[in-house]
Amino acid sequence: MTRWISFALLSLALPGLASAQGDGPRSFQHKPIGLNILTPMYLNIDSNFNFQQTILVKDADVVSDVGVLTYVRTFAVAGHTGEFRATGIWGSVSGTVNLPDETFGRTKVDIPRQSGIADPIFTYVQGLVGTPALTLEDFTGIPPRFQASVLFAAAPPLGQYDSDRLFNLGTNRWTLRLGVPLVLPFGSPASRTSLEITPSIYYFTDNTEPSGAANLREQDPRLVVELYLSRNFTPRLWGNVGLLGTWGGETITDGVPDDNRVSQLAAGGGLGYQITRSLSVLGVFGGVIHENDDSRGTMIRIQASWTF
């Protein structure tokens, strides 16, 4: 039973899509060194944000179908566990947006479906407290403990981008992230109950070719705080509930603020199941539950994780 619980803990590692969908439960919990984790994931997002979920477009109705594939490698650094993650993202985006019109005031315009490659994400996570570098054999059966790490992530502008399009899969700018994942386990070791808190700040470089007739689009930093409570019901079945708060991120186009600063709280929950010692699945549903910015959105996430 102990080995099942250990595998259930370490075989779930997933990325967030930009700063709105979050990393998900158990993503930054302590893992043994020498692991490879492959995580395919599908997301369906219905919102009034761009494909990357970083820019609020209040008068839009956007549907994004997203495919994600993340590779994780764990290793020892200064006596603690370090992780490198490489995330590829592809998908499609479509919908409608209401644009200003001299005759009718506002006119609904269709967003033609675009499919292709989005900006990849590269992440490094370094354990600092409660994250000793242990092999799988030594890791199995150790008691849960408080954990603190630091993460750095970068998304280079490698996705498809066309300034003639209102919505794009790529961003034509860099996105940088600094975060501090914290894990507080409690209860019996068999329950693997834990509270995870991950505050992150996202920074964005300027887009020098924004859509429309604009010449420059800047964006303020964005604060995102993720909170997840997860618990094992059996050695193989576990559940989670989570909250995600987002603040900031207003864009400025050619020196004029766009009045799209985000202030929202999203909530969700899901179930995970350990099929084998190395293969697990997780399903999550969530959406915006409170906002002061006219934002809205729902999200369905389905993923599998294979540890080898």
Image: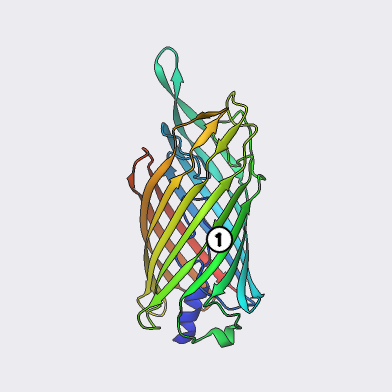
Within 10 Å of the Cα at label 1, are there few (<14), some (14-19), or many (20+) other Cα atoms?
some
The reply to whether residue 54 is in sight is yes
Residue farthest top in this picture: 103
298 up-or-down from 236: above or below:
above
Q: Position of residue 64 (x, y in %)?
A: 49, 44
The total number of labels drawn is 1
Give me the residue at 37% from left, 39% from top: 293
Residue farthest left in this picture: 290
291 up-or-down from 70: above or below:
above
Q: Position of residue 180 (x, y in %)?
A: 51, 63
Between 13 and 40, the one lying in front of the other is 13
Query: The C terminus is located in which quarter?
Result: bottom right
The reply to whether residue 17 is in sight is no
Give me the residue at 63% from left, 79% from top: 79
Q: Position of residue 298 (x, y in %)?
A: 39, 48
SS under mark 1: strand
Give me the residue at 43% from left, 71% from top: 273
Quarter of the figure with residue 139:
bottom right
Q: Position of residue 163 (x, y in %)?
A: 62, 31
| Residue at image mark 1 | 40
Give me the residue at 40% from left, 64% from top: 228
Q: Is residue 179 left or right of residue 45?
A: right
Quarter of the figure with residue 151:
bottom right
Q: How is the image coloured?
A: rainbow
245 up-or-down from 216: above or below:
below
| Amino acid type indicated by mark 1 | Pro
Between 163 and 186, the one lying in front of the other is 186
Q: Is residue 255 left or right of residue 192?
A: right
Query: The N terminus is located in which quarter?
Result: bottom left
